[in-house]
Image (cartoon, rainbow, N blue to C red):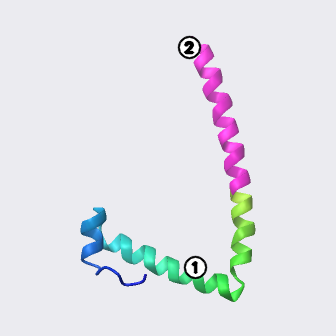
Amino acid sequence: MRGEKTMAELPTKYGIHPHMINGWKRKAVEGMADIFSGKGDKSGQANESEIKDLHAKIGQLTVERDFLSKAFGK
């Protein structure tokens, strides 16, 4: 973002494709614009809901794993 390295140097240094860096940079710039315009608050509420759903799924998968490990005697 600061331009310390060229777009040719970054993929070589980190071993990733240049398109990934361009995508990340574009998303970062768009995200910053939303944060400073006040739109970032709405996405925070959506993220909290998604996090709650993911925690529920983690709990479900943990119970299933424990059940199966007992059923197979591991």
Seen in the picture, residue 37 relative to 8 is either above or below; the reply is below
Mark number for residue 72?
Answer: 2
Amino acid type, mark 2: Phe
Q: Which residue reaches farthest front? A: 4
Q: CA distance from mark 2 to mark 1?
A: 47 Å
Task: Tell me if residue 30 is in the magenta stretch.
Answer: no
Q: Residue at x 68, y 88 (%)?
A: 37
Q: Residue at x 70, y 38 (%)?
A: 59
Q: Nearer the viewer, residue 53 or 7?
A: 7
Task: Tell me if residue 70 is in the magenta stretch.
Answer: yes
Q: Residue at x 74, y 59 (%)?
A: 49
Q: Which residues are magenta?
A: 51-74
Q: Nearer the viewer, residue 32 or 46?
A: 32
Give the secondary structure at mark 1. helix
Residue 23 appears left or right of 40? left
Principal secondary structure, stretch drawn in magenta: helix
- Judge the density around disc 1: few (<14), some (14-19), many (≥20) Cα neighbours within 10 Å: some
Mark number for residue 18?
Answer: none
Seen in the picture, residue 44 relative to 53 is either above or below; the reply is below
- Quadrant hosting residue 74: top right
Q: Position of residue 33 (x, y in %)?
A: 60, 86
Q: Quadrant of the N terminus?
A: bottom left
- Quadrant hosting residue 47: bottom right
- Judge the density around disc 2: few (<14), some (14-19), many (≥20) Cα neighbours within 10 Å: few
Q: Position of residue 44 (x, y in %)?
A: 71, 69
Amino acid type, mark 1: Gly
Report the label total: 2
Give the secondary structure at mark 2. loop
- The answer to whether residue 34 is visible is yes
Residue 45 appears left or right of 5? right
- The answer to whether residue 16 is visible is no
Q: Which residue is mark 1?
A: 31
